[in-house]
Image (tube, rainbow, N blue to C red):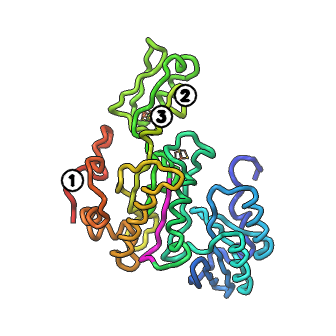
Amino acid sequence: MARTDIGPPHYQEMLPPVIKENYGKWQYHEILRPGVLKHVSENGVVVFTVRAASPRLVSVDFIRDVADLADKFCGGFLRFTSRHNVEFLLTDEHQVEPLITALAAKGLPVGGTGNSVSNMIHTQGWVHCHTPATDASGIVKAVMDELYEHFVEMKLPAKLRLALACCINMCGAVHCSDIAICGIHRVPPTIDHELFAKVSETPSVVAACPTYAIKPNPKTKSITINEEKCMYCGNCYTMSPAVNIMNPANDGVAIFVGGKVSNSRKPPMFSKLAIPYLPNNPPRWPEVTEAVKNIVHVWATNARPGERVGEWIERVGWERFFKLTGIPFTDKHIDDFTLAPTTFRSTTNFKY
Ligand code: SF4
Ligand code: SF4
């Protein structure tokens, strides 16, 4: 097969030998302690996985540090999970404790397995994208600092997956996480018409709008935005420097609950809106951390063993969810968007 520089190499090229040799032959696994898994293959081979948190936005120094640990303890192999945990796969049980001690010396906690909070995934934010309505890494750090005990212990009713996407394009896992924070813009973009005529490709800007809210305006050689149709996604802002959606006074975050990918017990579930707006309040986002902690606490207190957030809400009903969490139910929870004929929740009546 011709080699190109397009896309990543095939993942099998990167597998540790023990994983390659036992591919598809794993019989069972158990969790020895928070953050440490033991997988046993039908050949009797045993692999120990040590899962550590990562800061998500990682520096070259961080990569070098974890690569050095992988060289020392597990033949140079490590992997990042889809929620940005770093996993080391060891074949020698006696290396597990020394690795955990070495990780602790670097300030990296081990945990995130079983009934715990896994590392919180977030989108690229200001590092690589220009449409964020909030800071991705700062807010996640503030939330995870508050939930630290739930990463290193496994005392929740079920696993808890958290995510943050810094705008509604949601390249994070907001739709399929138990609790998710989503950056939102709340007012339509402004347009510098004079600049637009000089620097923009009108067809590209018009085509970028998912709700057909933008029309060319031949008179001004610019565009007009139908504000009724705008959902503040920022796509047009991406296409033209003359369009601006940033609005520090109005931008903030919304909180969604009840999503999951797993199909155990119930099929995968989409998350739904719980809190329509909380302000950006850096550097520690106290309103957001309190809101997340409250939902975690109410779920942990009321859910049955094994019940994910969405499954618990489905059992007790959304009305009771709002009552127990003390979150006000407002008109913003009713999806009356112009182009949403089949809505997630379009009425104030609840089903039991
Ligand atoms: Fe950019 Fe939005 Fe993705 Fe954040 S969620 S990285 S702002 S597209
Ligand atoms: Fe369309 Fe999104 Fe721009 Fe609004 S912000 S006009 S929905 S592209």
* Location of mark 3 (residue): 245
Q: If you read the primary sequence from the N terminus, does the residue marked by circle 2 or circle 1 appear first?
A: 2
The image shows residue 79, relative to residue 205, as above or below, that is below
In terms of depth relative to the viewer, which is nearer, 75 or 232?
232
Q: Nearer the viewer, residue 299 or 2?
A: 299
Magenta stretch secondary structure, dominant: loop
On the picture, is 191 further left or further right than 61? left
Expressed as whole percent of the image width and height from the top left, the position of residue 155 reads 47, 79
- Badge 2: few (under 14), some or many (20 or more) residues near its Cα, within 10 Å? some
**Residue 274: quarter of image:** bottom left
Residue 28 visible in rendering: no
In this figure, which residue is indicated by the disc labeled 1?
348
Q: In the structure shown, which secondary structural element does the residue marked by tag 1 occupy?
A: loop
Left or right: residue 168 compared with residue 91: left
Question: Disc 1 marks which amino acid?
Answer: Thr
- Count neighbours of disc 1 (C-alpha within 10 A) and say few if under 14, some if 14 to 19, many if 20 or more: few
The magenta region covers 156-164
Q: Residue furthest top?
A: 219
Q: Of marks 3 and 1, which one's residue comes earlier in the chain?
A: 3
Q: Residue at x 49, y 15 (%)?
A: 221
